[in-house]
Image (cartoon, rainbow, N blue to C red):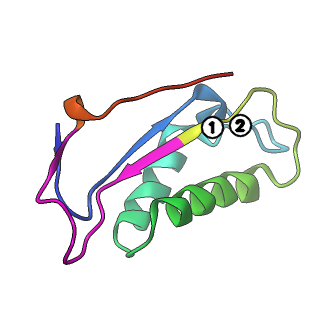
Amino acid sequence: MVLEPGDFLVVYTDGLVEALNHDRDMYGFDGAREHLARSAAVPATAQDRLDRCLADMQRFVDGERLHDDVTLVILQVPDGPDSPAAIDVRDVEWTSGL
């Protein structure tokens, strides 16, 4: 996968999509996908996208306790005069920890 300036990649754990509201409805893949599709239309930093996605999920659960961890990672190629032409994600070093 090659990301062009302005593109972003989102990786998340199942805790995001399995978050439940008081009616026991899941935020779900559709909820995450719809929010991220709306987010794509608005210029924002990766941190802004992350914060807004988590806020959207939290609005959905409306104070219900989360039953699983929620991890969300956003990789975004900056869009500006000093931006790289593209990034091949195979060349990106990934790390994680507990």
Q: Whole-percent x and y of residue 57?
A: 67, 51
The residue located at (29%, 57%) in the rendering is: 77
Q: Whole-percent x and y of residue 18?
A: 65, 31
Q: Amino acid at mark 2?
A: Ala
87 w.r.t. 56: above or below? above
Evaluate if marks 2 and 1 touch, with contact meaning CB atoms under 8 Å apart. yes
- Residue 75 is one of the magenta-drawn residues: yes
Q: How far apart, in angstroms, are the residues tagged by discs 2 and 1? A: 6 Å
Quadrant position of the C terminus in the picture = top right
The residue located at (71%, 39%) in the rendering is: 25
- Horizontal side of 9 relative to 28 (left or right) equals left
Q: Amino acid at mark 1?
A: Leu
Q: Whole-percent x and y of residue 66?
A: 82, 35
64 w.r.t. 90: above or below? below
Callout 2 crowding tier (Cα within 10 Å): few <14, some 14–19, many ≥20 = many
The residue located at (34%, 71%) in the rendering is: 41
- Horizontal side of 78 relative to 25 (left or right) equals left
Quadrant position of the N terminus in the picture = top left
Q: Which residue is mark 2?
A: 19
Q: What element does badge 2 sit on? A: loop
65 w.r.t. 54: above or below? above
- Horizontal side of 37 relative to 68 (left or right) equals left
Q: Residue furthest front?
A: 82
Quarter residue 92 falls in: top left
Q: Whole-percent x and y of residue 52?
A: 59, 63
Q: Is residue 97 or residue 74 the one in the foreground?
A: 97
Q: Residue furthest top?
A: 98
64 w.r.t. 15: above or below? below
Q: Which residue is mark 1?
A: 16
Question: What span is in magenta?
Answer: 73-88
Query: Which SS does the magenta portion mostly show?
Result: loop
- Residue 40 is one of the magenta-drawn residues: no
